[in-house]
Amino acid sequence: MFFLGIDIAKATFDVALLSEDGHPKCKVFANTPDGFAQLLRWLEQHLVRRDTLHACLESTGVYGNALAHFLYHQGCQTVSVVNPAATAALTAAFAKSQLARNKTDKTDAIRIARYAQALRPAAWTPPAPEIAYLQALSRRRDALLQMRTMESNRLETAPLGDPATAQPIAESIHTVIDLLDAQIASIEKQMHDHIDQTPSLRERRDLLDSIPGIAETTATALLAEMPDITAFADAPTLAAFVGLTPRQKESGSSIRGRSRLSKMGSARIRKALYWPAITAMRHNAAVKALRTRLLARGKDQRAIRGAAMRKLLHIVYGVLKSGKPFDASIALASGGSVA
């Protein structure tokens, strides 16, 4: 078995190839289709068959998407796309054990390869075409919203005083904001129409929309970013994937740190659930009851918000897994599972 660690940058990617003896062979390729083809030829030169290769790269943005798809469709036995936070502790420990003083793309590739060799992370599967399209639209909407926020902030700090200076700047900013508003509305309509015209997506959106606290915007974001629910054995497994499981800080018998969310998973799903969870604490009977119990136990507001997000995700899992709309009695019956 061979392990290929890949450190992605915008223009290039570094690879480190490990065989069972753990000896790394390193190379840099252009992050282009020609570079992908050169990678395959390089692997063949080292007598690596694709059905014996476990490739691993970090999900650090859009730069690795094309390579991950390429390796998957070229028949690599396993392609893993992992959260950088998941590799951080192991790679840091490896660097310390090797007395590594410098952090470079080459050393990062070696550490990712050793992570794959040690922990054998799960295989990544490209999303179905209808999900990939919805995801692209959803992420474009997020980018447009960020740009709109930036322009709104600029409007607040536009030159004051001389109207001859302030007015044209403000007018320009308003023009850009109007354009962004139009683009956001267009993207949202495309997402709505795409879901309406795709029966499987429409059914799941309607199930999610039945949950108090979740409206169409959140349902759309969850459909775009969450993998097939059948890939998870239970709701806690999904919560771990999203990074909503609490991480305890304890040492011996004397140190008891405040628990925090692990944040080792999908930041986009956590972001999508934040405000809905706050709404659910007021309007969703199951989440509201959880909040009451945690307040009685003296939990702080941050812990309660995290638990509410986790509870809401458990409800999402139950509704999608069962194919039945939200039922408060069922959700209340399972209330203790996330406290």
Image (cartoon, rainbow, N blue to C red):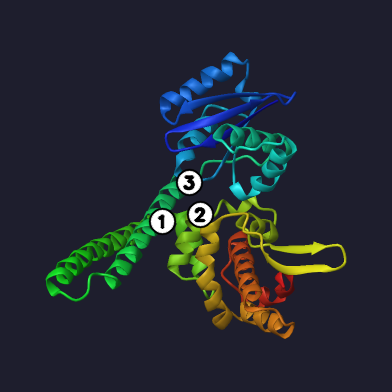
Residue at the disc numbered 3: 61
**Residue nearest the observer in this picture, 140 or 327:** 140
The residue lying at 45 percent from left, 25 percent from top is 35
Q: Earlier in the sequence, mark 3 or mark 1?
A: 3
The residue lying at 48 percent from left, 46 percent from top is 61
Spatial CA span between label 2 and label 3: 14 Å
**Do labels 3 and 1 touch, CB within 8 Å?**
no
Residue at the disc numbered 1: 138
Image coordinates of residue 339 in percent, x first then y, are 72, 73
Image coordinates of residue 44 in percent, x first then y, are 57, 16
Please say if 115 is above or below 34: below
Left or right of 74? Residue 142 is left
**Nearer the camera: disc 3 or disc 1:** 3
**Do labels 1 and 2 touch, CB within 8 Å?**
yes
The residue lying at 61 percent from left, 34 percent from top is 107
Q: Which of marks 2 and 3 is nearer the N terminus?
A: 3
Label 3 SS: loop
Quarter holding the N terminus? top right
Please say if 173 is above or below 283: above
**Which mark is on residue 225?**
2
